[in-house]
Image (spheres, rainbow, N blue to C red):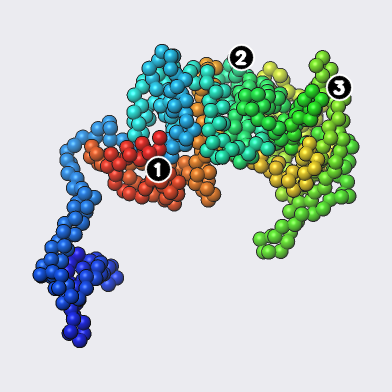
Amino acid sequence: MALKLDPVRSGRYTYLYIRRSYRDKGKGSSRTPVEKLGRLDKLAEQYEDPVAHFQAVVDDMNRAEQDVENRRRLTVSVDLDEAISPEDGLMNIGYAAILRIYSELGLQAFFNNRQRGKGFKYNAGAIMLLLVCERILNPGSKKRAFENRGMYFERFDFGLHDVYRSLRFFAELETDTQLQIDRRIQGITGGRNTEMVYYDVTNYYFEIDDEDEHRRKGVSKEHRPNPIIQMGLVMDSDGLPVSYRLFDGNTNDVMTLRETVHDLKVKNGYGRVIVVADKGINSADNLYYLTTTGGRTGDGYVMSLSVRGANRRFKEYVLDGEGYRTIWRDGPDGVPEAEFMLKSRLEIREVSVTGVSGKKIKKQLHEKQVIIWSRKYAERAKAERAAAIAKAHEMITDPSKYSRATHYGATRYVDNISVDRKTGELLVNAGRQPVFNHGLLAEEEKYDGYYAVVTSEQDRDDQWIMDTYRGLWEIEETFMISKHVVETRPVYVSRWECIRAHFLSCFISMVVIRLLERKLGDGHTTEQILDCLKKMRCARMTDNLYMFFHSSDITKALGEALDVDFSRKHLRLSEIKHIIAAMR
């Protein structure tokens, strides 16, 4: 800054200014007024020497600015002969977002309070934080997570043996941790939306061949021969996980619902809920259990129903073209096009329910049935069936090339072939030539494009039913994140308590990811967010100075959500510690 005297054109007066000079790339050096002090003759009435007085003021302002500038500038001395130190690895600051949500869920205090009186000295909350951070940023084994502990600005002062010992402790808190998270989410979000809860089941495989009490061979979603564990997951209407339950690998999907709903009602204290699920959960026992409790109206359901597996009367209603109405949408060129057709009816459906004695009892379900036909759904069904049909034709030519593991979905189109139960080998029935079953194919094609949704909520309109059922995609996406992003499987631990602790850390990770997505709002995929967190790394330049490498729209959004400036290229260690402390 400088003091400037500026005479007016008439020469009668001179004005005194404080001006700042700066460099404009387009115009070269430029000046801008900071403060207009007034006419020199008027200032002389107040000051003996106004020029000398205000020059001293400008000098003080320049010295103050220089002091600030000097504090924001450092000169770093580099020793070109210095050897690489083990502490010179890249550090991560992106985990600050994970830490914020972990803290909001109260998990650090929860685990530490529960470990009191247990007799071990390790920090359980810190161990789970490390496992969650690694599950989100660098999914792998527990040993690998421990080896990566140095990349965080945390005091992870525990040993690998402490990590393994803590797994039994976490397994004991499997249910209580879910309840803790459920209560805290209700506080964070202002209350869960639990009018509808979404339920689905998936399974996770183990890299072993032998079964044990829980790891059993069952119907693998990925068509693998390995032993599996089943997981039933509940989500609320906003797509946030509520709870999960593990089941033995050979447990049928339909057998998992009642225990899970019972936990929701008893342990979580939920009132009436409407369970939304796909046809894999739709059984007469489940629907009757949901809607009746001791003869009183209970909970509700919105579930898909297999058209191909339905009774003759239902199939006739589906294929009868009467009653369908077309739902239109704007096409890519603005011309309306048919999106799908639907019709609905109120129906009293008679079903067979398992009684206390184990015998089947006839009961009635009062429900609304919505039938939808979609061209895209029909095209997808044909495309998915095409591979099985092609394999069936190859199988007819040379059955010896295929086994149980390689023929999935194809043998139903081939007659005169059987499967060796012990070896899984395909066998040609003696004296008979394998032939393609064209009748079965024609029967399946009749129902391409049709699907049905049935609900106990008879007073709801068709649009509400369809929109509610479509919400299942969020739980399917959560399972996708679980398997492909946080890499819950394959599961490498073997003891049951370790398996339970592993899935608990994965569940916490999924909750953290979903809450982080809510903080950032729409516009970023899960993969983009997690990729950004992984890239938010820095390198140590000196003992107290770090240089950062990544900046993007997501880092800006994270900064706004967490009230942290992630735009600076250099930060002192004290500043980094201040950021981390603010996340707790």
Disc 3 to disc 2, how far (Cα)? 33 Å
Residue 90: x and y in percent read: 33, 38
The dot on residue 329 is: none
Q: Quadrant of residue 221?
A: top right
User: Which quadrant of the rendered structure holds the C terminus?
Assistant: top left
Frontmost of labels 3 and 2 is 3
| Residue appearing at x 10%, y 70% in the figure | 49
Residue 541: x and y in percent read: 25, 41
Q: Quadrant of residue 57?
A: bottom left
The residue wearing badge 1 is 535
Q: Amino acid at mark 2?
A: Glu
Direction from residue 410 to residue 31 in the image, left or right: left
Disc 1 to disc 2, how far (Cα)? 41 Å
Direction from residue 579 to residue 446 in the image, left or right: right
Q: Could you classify mark 1 by the number of other residues whose Cα lies within 10 Å: few (under 14), some (14-19), or many (20 or more)? A: some
Q: Could you classify mark 3 by the number of other residues whose Cα lies within 10 Å: few (under 14), some (14-19), or many (20 or more)? A: few
Task: Name the N-terminal-most of marks 1 and 2.
Answer: 2
Residue 561: x and y in percent read: 45, 46
Q: Amino acid at mark 3?
A: Ile
The dot on residue 361 is: 3
Residue 372: x and y in percent read: 78, 46
Dot 3 and dot 2 residues touching (CB under 8 Å):
no
Dot 1 and dot 3 residues touching (CB under 8 Å):
no
The residue wearing badge 2 is 213
Direction from residue 562 to residue 359 in the image, left or right: right
Frontmost of labels 1 and 3 is 3
| Residue appearing at x 44%, y 27% in the figure | 109
Regarding residue 160, the answer to whether it shows in the image is no
